[in-house]
Amino acid sequence: MTSRRVIDALWLTSGPAGRVLALLNGDGEEARAVGGAVRNALMGLDVGEIDIATTAVPDEVVRRAKVAGIKSVPTGIEHGTVTLVVEGTPVEVTTLREDVETFGRKAKVMFGRDWQRDAERRDFTMNGLSASIDGVVHDHVGGIADVDAKRVRFIGDPDRRIAEDYLRILRFFRIHAAYGAGAPDREGYLASIRGRDGMAGLSAERIRMELLKLLVAPGAGAAAEAMIDAGLMLRICGGITYLGPFRKMIGIEQELALAPDAMLRLGALAVAVTEDAKRLMQRLRLTNEENKALDSMGHRWWRLKGMNEARAKQRLYRLGAARYRNRMLLAWARDGGSGDGAEWKQLIALPERWTPPVFPLKAADFIARGIAKGPGLGHVLALAEDAWMANDFPMEVDVITVIADQTIARFKHDHRL
């Protein structure tokens, strides 16, 4: 099956990708743009990164690049991939391949010159398209029809495609969430259920990468629901997932005109208590910063509903603007009550109308009042800061002096000094 469509794509003849295509076409060789760039061009979306496939073997790619004064990096030369750096932009070039044996990510391949065979070894039909420098889109796997229908479908037998790399289960839902419409392709969905046990062998890093992309895709809500129904989210997150708060977080982001945030959405989906954040850190190999963000979001969020502004200011002072906002957003997403969210919006907007001041008292202020250096000094500072916060963060010198003196009196009374 072969079909064609012509696209008007300046990126095929200009810029770094255009230079590489011009370099690798001719003298018996052919090069085309492949995969996501072609799919996106057909959908009228931003092309993004442009990958190139070619009939030329890696040594020939390197030779031509050298003659043209283009730097080449052998990023995966054993698999036929060379990265050419053009005008500071990396362009990945891969020689056409055919599978000799397939066993997961370690498939044995040989270089080829058959565009159809190369397309047939890819994952989904809409990713199996290629475009030559003249704008002709070549389709050997029915990808154009699936792009038009916004249908994500495995190339060939879904069970075989999944067995070659079980990460394709996650990619199936992620690509559908990003580019599909309606329910996931039934054959692919059922194959994902049949193959879900194979996900146990995937690295946490690869799962994390796909999951975080999926969570911010336009169709993330429906994709998450389908994955929960298929028993996939339990395997990924290792615990209960909460579809209602996840969908509500998506709606809150849209209502507040916030960019989709993977950590916020992951928190809404899978973090009810801080222990959930710790589990996700281990299962997904989250970065320290990601783990801290989730842990902070999940910390006693249920206490925030109905909070007055004075206490909200104390939270903002302690947490900082970013973590304060995220905890409030998670609490709102998990709030099962009705209403238009006006109270939550007021709380979330607090950093826009109030900036926490810097605590005006220092250790030197208490040393001068007779408190010796050591653990006691730190305790006095903490007591004074609590009192300052409770008095609504005053900055007047006379009020601060009273707070300092009263704190010392309390400390001495408690320690019978």
Image (cartoon, rainbow, N blue to C red):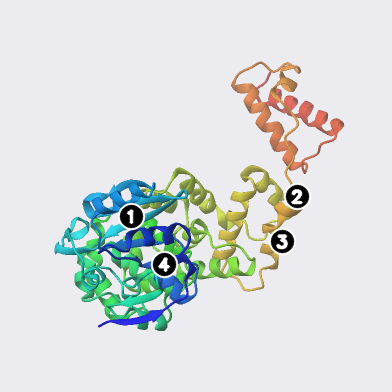
Sooner in the amino-acid sequence: mark 1 or mark 3: 1
Q: Which quadrant of the structure image shows residue 27?
A: bottom left
Q: At which x and y percent is residue 25?
A: 32, 63
Count neighbours of disc 4 (C-alpha within 10 A) and say few if under 14, some if 14 to 19, many if 20 or more. many
Q: At which x and y percent is residue 364?
A: 72, 20
Q: Which circle, 4 or 1, is nearer the viewer?
A: 4
Q: Which circle, 1 or 3, is nearer the viewer?
A: 1
Res. 239 in view: no
Count neighbours of disc 2 (C-alpha within 10 A) and say few if under 14, some if 14 to 19, many if 20 or more. few
Q: Which circle, 2 or 1, is nearer the viewer?
A: 1
Sooner in the amino-acid sequence: mark 3 or mark 2: 3
Give the position of the N terminus as an image quadrant.
Answer: bottom left
Question: In 3D space, how far apart are the residues under numbered discs 2 and 1 (Cα atoms)?
Answer: 41 Å
Question: In 3D space, how far apart are the residues under numbered discs 3 and 4 (Cα atoms)?
Answer: 42 Å
Q: Which quadrant of the structure image shows residue 331?
A: bottom right
Please state which amino acid type lies under the numbered disc 4.
Ala
User: Dot 1 corresponds to which residue?
Assistant: 206
| Disc 3 and disc 4 in contact, CB within 8 angstroms | no
Question: In 3D space, how far apart are the residues under numbered discs 1 and 3 (Cα atoms)?
Answer: 39 Å
Residue 37's disc number: 4
User: Dot 3 corresponds to which residue?
Assistant: 346
Sooner in the amino-acid sequence: mark 3 or mark 4: 4
* Residue at (43, 80) in percent of width and height: 181
Question: Foreground: 364 or 254?
Answer: 254
Q: Is residue 116 above or below residue 400?
A: below
Q: Is residue 141 above or below residue 354?
A: below
Question: In 3D space, how far apart are the residues under numbered discs 4 and 1 (Cα atoms)?
Answer: 22 Å
Sooner in the amino-acid sequence: mark 2 or mark 4: 4
